[in-house]
Image: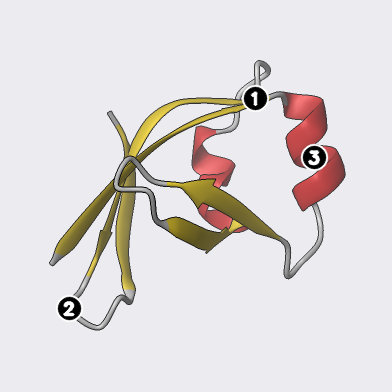
Amino acid sequence: MKDYYFSLNISYQEFVAHYSGVAANVVVMTEQNLRLQLPASRFRPYLSQLGIRGRFRLVTDDNNKFHKLEIL
């Protein structure tokens, strides 16, 4: 398993406007300076009236397949 840490601060309006498409992605820069692209749908459980804010941990398997995303 691999862990990647990053922070996001996206307003509700920005998230809905830019990432409402079926195949839309969110691109983040990790604390390890890696650029990752994730489906926007993975962030919907964390969407509030304020948007998506916080520090996250992405866990992948050894083949870089998504395992889980959690807010810290």
Which SS class for mark 2?
A: loop
- Residue hosting label 3: 16
Q: Is residue 10 left or right of residue 36?
A: right
| Pair 2/3: label in front | 2
Q: Earlier in the sequence, mark 2 or mark 3?
A: 3
Question: Are discs 1 and 2 less than 8 Å apart at CB?
Answer: no
Which SS class for mark 1?
A: loop
Q: Earlier in the sequence, mark 1 or mark 2?
A: 1
Q: Is 54 in front, or is 68?
A: 54
Which kind of residue does numbered mark 2 sit on?
Answer: Asp
- Residue hosting label 1: 51
Residue at left offset 37%, top offset 48%: 33
- Residue hosting label 2: 62
State the image coordinates of residue 55 (x, y, percent, origin top left).
37, 29
- CA–CA distance in space, label 2 to label 3: 32 Å
| Pair 1/2: label in front | 2
State the image coordinates of residue 7 (x, y, percent, origin top left).
43, 31
Image mark count: 3
